[in-house]
Amino acid sequence: MKKVNTKMTPNYDLQRLKTPAIEEAVAILLNNNIQPNENNNVDMELNKLKQGVETLKKEILNPDKIKRKYWITTEILNLMEEKRQNKGNPTEYKRIQCIIKNVARSDTIKICTMTSMFTGKSEK
């Protein structure tokens, strides 16, 4: 059987709208993008509204990278993205992979020691 690949839609960070500065910036940008024209064409106005909202979502409400494990930091995520971009270059790919492993190990050790300091238990 053939597997069907479904596209995942990006989840935009709507929590950012709760901060007053971002809420105000979004309101200003939307008002600037959606100025009524003399044209009374509803389709053109609707498309203009859709494009304005899409650009705002991409510029301001872009999602943060999802961390699936507690030890993954933004540094590791950035290195993983760099590794993905160097997929065609095997030497650079392996070099970045070694860096990722070392950073992940050191971060995991730091987190485990901090956890054991606060809880009084040692974790493996």
Image (cartoon, rainbow, N blue to C red):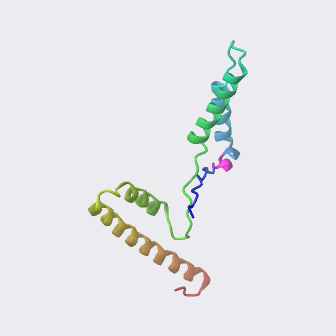
- Using residue 124 as the reference point, say whether residue 15 is left or right of it: right
26 w.r.t. 122: above or below: above
Residue 94's spot in the image, x, y percent? 31, 66
Residue visible at 59% across and 80% down in the picture = 118
Residue visible at 57% across and 41% down in the picture = 58
- Using residue 37 as the reference point, say whether residue 102 is left or right of it: left
Q: Residue 69 occupies which quadrant of the picture? A: bottom right
Q: 114 or 28, which is in the foreground?
A: 28
Q: Residue 100 occupies which quadrant of the picture? A: bottom left
Q: Quadrant of the N terminus?
A: bottom right
Residue 122's spot in the image, x, y percent? 55, 87
Residue visible at 60% across and 53% down in the picture = 8
Q: Residue 120 occupies which quadrant of the picture? A: bottom right
28 w.r.t. 101: above or below: above
**Outermost residue toward the front?**
1
Q: 85 or 99, which is in the foreground?
A: 85
Taking the magenta stretch, the answer to whether it contains residue 93 is no
**Outermost residue toward the left?**
91
Taking the magenta stretch, the answer to whether it contains residue 14 is yes
114 w.r.t. 124: above or below: above
Residue 84's spot in the image, x, y percent? 40, 57
Q: Which residues are magenta?
A: 12-16
Q: 78 or 53, which is in the foreground?
A: 53
60 w.r.t. 90: above or below: above
Overall secondary structure of the magenta stretch? helix
Residue visible at 65% across and 28% down in the picture = 47
Q: How many marks?
A: 0
